[in-house]
Amino acid sequence: MILFIASVLDKASVNIANKIVDLYNFKPSGDYFHDNPVYVKEIDSNEIVKLIWIKDEPVNAQYIDKLFKPKLVVFLSRHSSKSGIPTLSVHTPGNFKDASLGGLPNKLSISPANAMRNALVQMAKGREEYGLKYEVSYECTHHGPSLDLPTMFVELGSTERQWLDEQAATVVATAAVSAVKSEGEVEAVLGIGGPHYNMKFTKLALKGEYAFGHMIPNYAIPKVDLSVVKQCVSRTLERVEKAVLDWKGIKGSFKNKLLNYLSELDLKVVKV
């Protein structure tokens, strides 16, 4: 079973979830969760997908892995940024250190690298199909929840105007469903360095070179030690044997430390 999660508090989330129900003919299962009907659909060779609505913000849904045991969790969510740039994005939740926005401190969710890449690729295709003036990007690992399940966010942003955009919500809905499909798998890697929206990693994934799992941005590197890097590797669904470094996007004072960590974990290093 695969679990899609929408929040009644999130306008983009509701928009995306409604598109999924309409486009893919999800049906009420007869069950309820948080006083809302649970929807269900069989997708991609007998894979059962359930869609639930929660009464909390997605970042605060730390209880999910106590109640459900799906193969994959996909949160449907708004994206917010000060820049207001229209953006379609995908990432894994988790906290490298403090839990300032949901989740648990020092704990990452399990990253489904190829499912995220499938969603990212579909976002790029949908953007072209609808002629949308949106950025398509990976986001680095951040915020809650910190689940013991393969977990990802597909997001629509960055302001209310985009959250209510019907075409953009359709693209994110198709991206969520694409995440379910196990096709076209490529090598899963750890990404380190660069900005929160790493276009180098995004372009490599769209070209089919790598599927990025956890990504550590430059601003988070001071919080990172060997245990964090080790967790990024162990808490990726696929086997990770390589780290891709945005070399210019890593401060010089941290480069040797990171290389030592990667060497200790016997990871191959690629600099981009």
Image: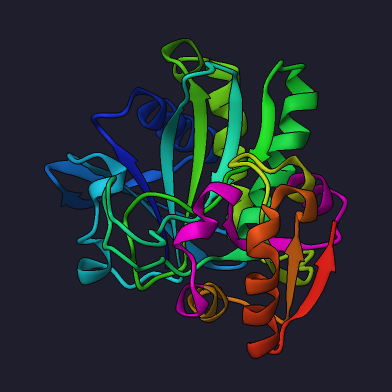
User: Residue 22, image x and y in percent?
Assistant: 48, 31
User: Residue 191, image x and y in percent?
Assistant: 67, 61
The answer to whether 93 is drawn above or below residue 101 in the figure is below
Q: Quadrant of the C terminus?
A: bottom right
User: In front: 141, or 266?
Assistant: 266
- Seen as rendered, the residue at the extreme top is 161
- Seen as rendered, the residue at the extreme front is 253
Task: State the residue at coordinates (47%, 24%).
Answer: 81
The answer to whether 200 is drawn above or below residue 113 in the figure is above
The answer to whether 146 is drawn above or below residue 90 in the figure is below
Which quadrant of the view contains residue 239?
Answer: bottom right
User: In front: 176, or 259?
Assistant: 259
User: Residue 215, image x and y in percent?
Assistant: 60, 58
* Magenta part of the chain: 202-228
Q: Is residue 212 magenta?
A: yes
Q: Quadrant of the N terminus?
A: bottom left
**Horizontal side of residue 237 vs 194, given as left or right:** left
Task: State the residue at coordinates (33%, 53%).
Answer: 144
Residue 239 makes an appearance in the image:
no
- Seen as rendered, the residue at the extreme left is 35
Q: How many marks?
A: 0
Q: Is residue 88 magenta?
A: no
Task: State the residue at coordinates (71%, 57%).
Answer: 252
The answer to whether 172 is drawn above or below residue 215 in the figure is above
Task: State the residue at coordinates (14%, 46%).
Answer: 34
**Horizontal side of residue 133 vs 76, given as left or right:** right
User: Residue 92, image x and y in percent?
Assistant: 49, 56
User: In front: 171, or 56?
Assistant: 56
User: In front: 124, or 171?
Assistant: 124
Residue 175 makes an appearance in the image:
yes
**Horizontal side of residue 178 vs 91, given as left or right:** right
